[in-house]
Amino acid sequence: MNVIQTEIPGVVVIEPVVHGDERGFFLETFQARRYSEVAEIGLPFVQDNYSRSAKGVLRGLHFQKLRPQGKLVRVVRGEVYDIAVDIREGSPTFGRWFGTILNEDNKKQLWVPPGLAHGFVVLSDIADFEYKCTDYYDPADEGCLAWDDPDIGIEWPVDSPVLSSKDQEGLLLAELFK
């Protein structure tokens, strides 16, 4: 597998080895020893999540406040623009974001380490999205960063995304640690 470092420490794009022929393809989506040695993802995964969303749906930017989750994410059907935002206090890249296209053709994965906010917007008609998490989801511990915070300046490829009521009420970065 190929591991691509990003400008945010700990955030990596993973290009798995895909074995394909006229019958289809096969790839490993996770293997603990290899991901620990090559991608430096050594945390145990305790929960797998799956979502399906329609075109224009933006989910995020979500994070857990007291028990941050690391997330290994991928798209199995469709295409999304996936975002990680560094909200780790004291980090040299605090407030910076990284975005990449994940889709069923490139089969890339994104590792979002604990302490970052995460979200995505669907670019295809529908997208099936999977993520492995390093801690259990706790709705009482969830936070939401405003997807359109001007201080972060994410360059989303959509103008008017479809948002949940929770995501419409996301906080600005400046409000997170008051």
Image (cartoon, rainbow, N blue to C red):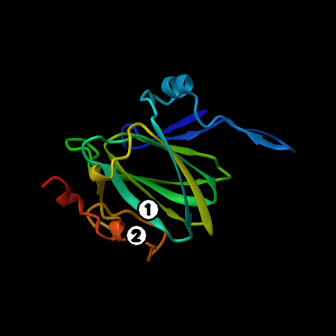
Q: Mark 2 highlights which residue?
A: 164
**In the image shown, does 67 or 16 lie closer to the viewer?**
67
Q: Amino acid at mark 1?
A: Arg
Which mark, by number, is residue 17? Answer: none
The secondary element bearing badge 2 is classed as: loop
Near-viewer residue (128 or 6)? 128
Distance of label 1 from label 2 (alpha carbons): 8 Å
| One can see residue 95 in this view | no
**Percent of width and height locating residue 118:** 39, 52
Quadrant where the N terminus is found in the figure? top right
What amino acid type is highlighted by mark number 2?
Answer: Ser
Q: Which residue is mark 1?
A: 59
Seen in the image, is 65 located left or right of residue 164? Answer: left
Of 137 and 156, nearer the camera is 137
Q: Is residue 147 above or below residue 47?
A: below
Q: Are marks 1 and 2 in contact (CB under 8 Å)?
A: yes
**Is 80 situated left or right of 63 in this image?**
right
Query: How many C-alpha atoms fall within 10 Å of the one at disc 2: few (<14), some, or many (≥20)?
Result: few
Outermost residue toward the left?
Answer: 178
